[in-house]
């Protein structure tokens, strides 16, 4: 079953009088339980595609559906609700809330979802343990290494039990050891907890770990290989 | 919402110095407002005391025909009985009967037209401070003895001083010419031009004798124990019940211009608050705008992970409201001290205006004391909160309009 269905996705950006077409008529389906890497050179349109799937950006033409809901038909508030309920995000530069502890960052989405305090605590503690941050709950982002911060970001992304996690270059700012560890973590969450991941990445290690690799060039899908 | 408030509180302390400077600026504005409002309230309280309590009284009783034409025949009859009846009324503090008559007042060196005012000295002292305005001589005796107290300018004009005699000539109520000799016993300097230039006070019984008024007066002025409008209106109703044929008026009915002048108090307060907090609003606006701009990327993340625009607005507003709470706490301490100083020491301008400050016929003491009322403080606190919210509306709205994808690219 497809969680994500992209049809004829085109995204233009206007820079002064020049129109740049970042994505050109992309068709893509992501099924439940996939571990998909969207790869390609810089400017190939992979991040734009990811942003459109996550409802962070709007297509110039074409449609993006998540769980059967056409994102183009939703208001800003409804789009927020859908992201909150169905999509988790991991960003290249972690993007944690600096005034919140690791625990509070991971808990944030659950609070917005209105999960009861007891259940929230159970799930956050379990998630932090799953990402290897047990004992670091009370640390603020500034007290954590880059790898630990990205683990908190992963915990935040999956704590709300989304149908899909979108990760934009999640290992770009990490050293190789930390990257390996993070990739193993996400793969474990995919294999053992059924979390669907879609990455945009240049990282060969992520590409090696992916079950499906979609290669984009000049805004179009050049190849789509399931291993 | 509590969680958003908690984040807002923590965000406030990310730029501790900037937040404290902004809150400090608002607190200084609040302090100035509290002090100025206390000063204005003090001045208006003085005006109320002088114009209302010492001149108009809370309630005035007249013959219904008298206020419009001020003809000496339109009197309240059986005045002693009426005054005694009003004395017995619950809630009255002072009851002062008065009579008036135009006369020609002459001495050895000159003469002039005056308005003779007949008063009962003891009752009048309970109501007005005229007796405290003596600059020479003594106040009228409690028993009629043909003594007269003059405004000091009138005395200069007539070239008389304490101990001199004057002749008053007037037309009595029966049409005959009335005349009498009075001895100048005292001179008053009130600062009120009309009273200083034409004021001539004699004992009520002396004026009744001169005008052949018998037991009649033109006016009975009363002070009630409760000086609120509700209290005064209730007193007027009680008086009307006892004097059904008389015209009973509250001070604001007797003198609408006085009412209008005193009602300026709130307008002045709003003006002071508006000016001070307009400046403070720019400070808050700047702080919140900077705060939002600095955190554009972070706010984009919050939007991306599912925070609704409305909740983002609430979070930014919480931050500004907390700023207002800190400013209020600081302002209440500083403003409280300023208010206390104004109440205890006041502003002493006696070096510049020894005899007080005359305005529109009212003479205020040269030391302006503050008067603190809870309403003035509440108004200032409300202004801080309104400023906090209004000044943060635009930054909050801008934050809510951020496109997540654009905000996430922000450095």
Image (cartoon, coloured by chain):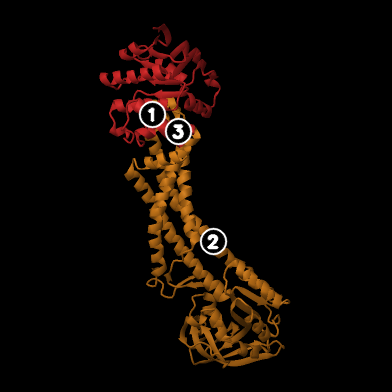
Chain colours: A red, B orange
Mark closer to the chain start, 3 or 1: 3
Camera-side mark, 2 or 1: 1
Within the image, what quadrant is residue A119 found in?
top left
Could you tell me how far apart the alpha carbons at marks 2 and 1 are, in whole angstroms? 66 Å
Q: Name the residue under label 2.
A: B264
Could you tell me how far apart the alpha carbons at marks 3 and 2 are, in whole angstroms? 60 Å
Kind of element beneath mark 2: helix
Give residue A126's mark. Answer: 1
Judge whether A55 appears above or below B251 on screen. Answer: above
What subunit carries mark 1?
A: A
Image point 51% across, 90% down: which residue? B185
Image point 50% across, 83% down: which residue? B131
Camera-side residue of B34 and A162: A162
Same-chain check, marks 3 and 2: no
Within the image, what quadrant is residue B170 found in?
bottom right
Kind of element beneath mark 1: helix
């Amino acid at each position: 079953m497809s969680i994500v269905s992209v049809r004829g996705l085109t995204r233009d950006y206007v820079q002064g009088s020049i129109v740049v077409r970042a994505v050109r008529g992309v068709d893509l389906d992501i099924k439940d339980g996939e571990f998909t890497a969207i790869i390609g050179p810089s400017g190939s349109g992979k991040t734009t595609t990811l942003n459109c799937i996550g409802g962070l950006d709007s297509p110039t033409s074409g449609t993006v559906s998540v769980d059967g809901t056409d994102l183009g038909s939703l208001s800003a508030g409804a789009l927020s609700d859908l992201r909150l309920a169905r999509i988790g995000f991991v960003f290249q530069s972690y993007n944690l809330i600096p005034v919140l502890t690791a625990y509070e960052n991971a808990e944030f989405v659950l609070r917005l979802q209105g999960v009861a305090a007891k259940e929230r605590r159970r799930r956050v503690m379990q998630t932090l343990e799953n990402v290897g941050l047990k004992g670091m709950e009370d640390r603020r982002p500034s007290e954590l290494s880059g790898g630990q911060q990205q683990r908190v970001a992963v915990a935040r992304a999956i704590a709300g039990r989304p149908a899909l996690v979108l990760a934009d270059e999640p290992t770009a700012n990490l050293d190789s050891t930390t990257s390996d560890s993070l990739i193993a973590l996400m793969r474990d969450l995919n294999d053992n907890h059924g979390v669907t991941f879609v990455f945009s990445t240049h990282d060969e290690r992520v590409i090696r770990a992916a079950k499906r690799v979609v290669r984009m060039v000049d805004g179009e899908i050049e190849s789509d290989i399931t291993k | 919402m509590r969680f958003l408030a908690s984040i807002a509180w923590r965000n406030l302390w990310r730029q501790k110095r900037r937040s404290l400077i902004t809150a400090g600026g608002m607190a200084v504005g609040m302090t100035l407002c509290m002090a100025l409002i206390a000063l204005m309230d003090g001045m208006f309280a003085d005006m109320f005391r002088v114009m209302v309590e010492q001149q108009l009284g809370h309630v005035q009783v007249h013959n219904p025909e008298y206020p419009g034409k001020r003809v000496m025949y339109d009197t309240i009859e059986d005045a002693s009985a009426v005054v005694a009846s009003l004395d017995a009324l619950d809630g009255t503090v002072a009851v002062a009967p008065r009579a008036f008559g135009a006369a020609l007042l002459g001495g050895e060196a000159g003469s002039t037209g005056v308005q003779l005012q007949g008063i009962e000295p003891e009752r009048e002292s309970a109501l007005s401070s005229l007796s405290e305005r003596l600059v020479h001589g003594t106040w009228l005796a409690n028993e009629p003895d043909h003594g007269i107290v003059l405004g000091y300018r009138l005395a200069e004009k007539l070239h008389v001083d304490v101990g001199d005699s004057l002749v008053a000539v007037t037309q009595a109520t029966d049409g005959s010419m009335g005349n009498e000799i009075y001895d100048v016993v005292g001179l008053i300097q009130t600062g009120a031009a009309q009273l200083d230039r034409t004021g001539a006070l004699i004992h009520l019984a002396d004026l009744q004798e001169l005008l052949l008024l018998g037991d009649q007066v033109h006016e009975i002025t009363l002070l009630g124990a409760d000086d609120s409008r509700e209290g005064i209106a209730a007193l007027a109703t009680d008086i009307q019940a006892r004097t059904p044929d008389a015209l009973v008026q509250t001070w604001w009915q007797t003198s609408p211009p006085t009412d209008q002048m005193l009602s300026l108090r709130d307008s002045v307060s709003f003006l002071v608050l508006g000016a001070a907090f307009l400046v403070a609003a720019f400070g808050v606006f700047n702080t919140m705008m900077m705060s939002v701009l600095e955190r554009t990327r972070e706010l984009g993340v919050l939007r991306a992970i599912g925070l609704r625009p409305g909740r983002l607005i609430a979070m930014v507003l919480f931050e500004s409201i907390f700023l207002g709470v800190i400013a209020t706490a600081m302002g209440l301490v500083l403003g409280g001290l300023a208010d206390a100083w104004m109440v205890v020491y006041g502003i002493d301008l006696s070096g510049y205006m020894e005899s007080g400050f005359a305005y529109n016929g009212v003479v205020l003491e040269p030391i302006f004391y503050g008067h603190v009322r809870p309403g003035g403080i509440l108004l200032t606190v409300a202004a801080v909160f309104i400023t906090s919210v209004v000044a943060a509306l635009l930054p909050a709205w801008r934050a809510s309009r951020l496109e997540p994808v654009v905000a996430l690219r922000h450095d």
